């Protein structure tokens, strides 16, 4: 993978590698045709100082149950239905440095494949004790973790009978707000990944494999939860200028 700094050496973000990432218009994933740019992209001079040095997240914004999707929407003290698991991993920048103190958000369907969303069209039932959203802040080594249930596969109106494999959506902020990444995580061994029009919009199979969480038998909670590991690598910044900057400054 080739990467070039967007500008300068200090404070620069790496540019997206458009060979590694899927083309904006992938007809097998129908909605991309409508939203793909029709004109050549404009190159901006660079990020503004506020984007490069903007505020970071404080640990105080989190509720203790924010990273426990089994209980964080509970209506009556009950717990979400489904196969219980821990999802964890390390957020790294492109220079393999841990991204500490950053906000990781995740959202998913319930065990039946149903989202709690007013425009949801799938008939699988809602779980009264499952909301499907959570968040965590990475620790000093860049690790996040949360507890949840395995989401179900669900159908979607793309090609008549397309189904999404079980997946969890992620949003990650890197060193600054300008680095936000949104992606999806799949599960090791799921044959449906290779029938998914969204996963197949990625031209390089090894890039798809970077989106597949690995079953980790060493991190399971005995008699309680399986564990999957999903590491996330962001485009990095070459500068170490803010590496030891006090939080919030
Ligand atoms: Fe989804």
Image (tube, helix red, strand yellow):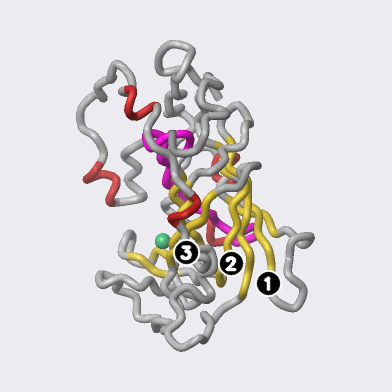
- Measured from the top left, where is residue 50 in percent x and y? 32, 28
Closer to the eye: label 3 or 2: 3
- Measured from the top left, where is residue 23 in percent x and y? 38, 36
Please tell me which residue lies in front, 201 or 47. 47
Q: Which residue is drawn at 52% across and 19% down?
A: 239
- Measured from the top left, where is residue 43 in percent x and y? 28, 19
User: Which residue is labeled 3 in the image?
Assistant: 63
- Does the magenta segment cover residue 85? no
User: Which residue is labeled 1 in the image?
Assistant: 225
Say whether disc 1 or disc 2 marks the residue closer to the N-terminus.
2
Q: Residue 111 carries which label?
A: none
Q: Residue 147 carries which label?
A: 2
Say whether disc 3 or disc 1 marks the residue closer to the N-terminus.
3
Q: Total marks drawn?
A: 3
Q: Quadrant of the C terminus?
A: top left
Q: Distance between the residues labelled 3 and 1?
A: 22 Å
- Residue 185's place in the image compared with 122, above or below, is above
């Amino acid at each position: 993978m080739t990467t070039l700094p967007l500008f300068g050496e200090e404070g620069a973000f790496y540019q997206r590698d458009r060979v590694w990432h899927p083309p904006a218009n992938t007809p097998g994933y129908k909605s991309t045709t409508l939203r793909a740019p029709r004109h050549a992209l404009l190159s901006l001079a660079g990020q503004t100082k506020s984007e490069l040095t903007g505020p970071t997240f404080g640990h105080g914004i989190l509720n203790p149950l924010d990273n426990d999707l089994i209980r964080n929407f509970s209506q009556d003290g009950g717990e979400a239905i489904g196969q219980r698991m821990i999802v964890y991993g390390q957020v790294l920048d492109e220079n393999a440095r841990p991204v500490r103190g950053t906000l990781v958000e995740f959202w998913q369907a319930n065990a039946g494949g149903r989202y709690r969303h007013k425009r949801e069209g799938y008939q699988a039932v809602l779980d009264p004790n499952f909301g499907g959203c959570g968040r965590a802040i990475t620790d000093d080594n860049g690790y996040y973790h949360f507890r949840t249930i395995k989401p179900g596969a669900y159908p979607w109106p793309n090609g008549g009978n397309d189904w999404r494999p079980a997946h969890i959506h992620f949003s990650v902020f890197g060193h600054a707000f300008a680095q936000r990444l949104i992606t999806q995580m799949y599960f090791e061994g799921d044959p449906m990944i290779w029938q998914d029009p969204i996963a197949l919009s990625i031209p390089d199979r090894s890039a798809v494999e970077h989106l597949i969480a690995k079953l980790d038998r060493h991190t399971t909670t005995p008699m309680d939860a399986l564990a999957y590991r999903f590491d996330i690598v962001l485009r990095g910044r070459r500068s170490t200028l803010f590496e030891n900057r006090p939080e919030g400054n």
